[in-house]
Image (tube, rainbow, N blue to C red):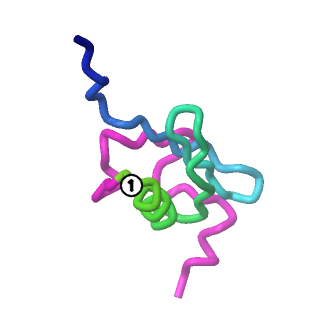
Amino acid sequence: MTHPPTEHPHVVVHPPALDGSRRVTEGDATLGIATHVDDVSEILRLADLYVTDVADSDLVEWQGGGPDDWPGLSEHHEA
């Protein structure tokens, strides 16, 4: 009798695109496009992947920069 794998999903936040947005994937599936770290949280929530702290989670791999790296987009989120 085989059991399904119990490993956690492997989510990747890809390096910023030319416009600063970052693709969020799980395996071969694109979950969404993020323009802020809060977008990553929302994309994962909508995919039923509840990660409480995407910036410091072992489930999320940040490529090409961390959760604070959104080149060209930071001015859009300042109050």
Q: Where does residue 32 sit, x and y in percent of width and height? A: 60, 54
As for residue 59 lying within the magenta part, the answer is: yes
* Amino acid type, label 1: Asp
Q: Where does residue 15 sit, x and y in percent of width and height? A: 62, 43
Q: Where does residue 12 sit, x and y in percent of width and height? A: 50, 40
Considering every residue shown, the one lying at the far top of the view is: 1
Residue that carries the numbered disc 1 in the rendered image = 48
The kind of secondary structure element at disc 1 is loop
- Check the picture and name the quadrant holding the N terminus: top left
Q: Nearer the viewer, residue 60 or 6?
A: 6
How many circles with numbers are drawn on the protein?
1
Residue 16 left/right relative to 8: right
Q: Which residues are magenta?
A: 50-79
Identify the residue at image location x=52%, y=33%. 27
Reply above or below: 72 against 76: above
Characterize the magenta stretch by its predominant secondary structure.
loop
Q: Please tell me how crowded label 1 is: few (under 14), some (14-19), or many (20+) other residues with Cα within 10 Å.
A: few
Identify the residue at image location x=68%, y=58%. 20
Q: Where does residue 22 sit, x and y in percent of width and height? A: 62, 52
Identify the residue at image location x=42%, y=35%. 10
* Quadrant hosting residue 78: bottom right
Considering every residue shown, the one lying at the far front of the view is: 1
Reply above or below: 1 against 79: above
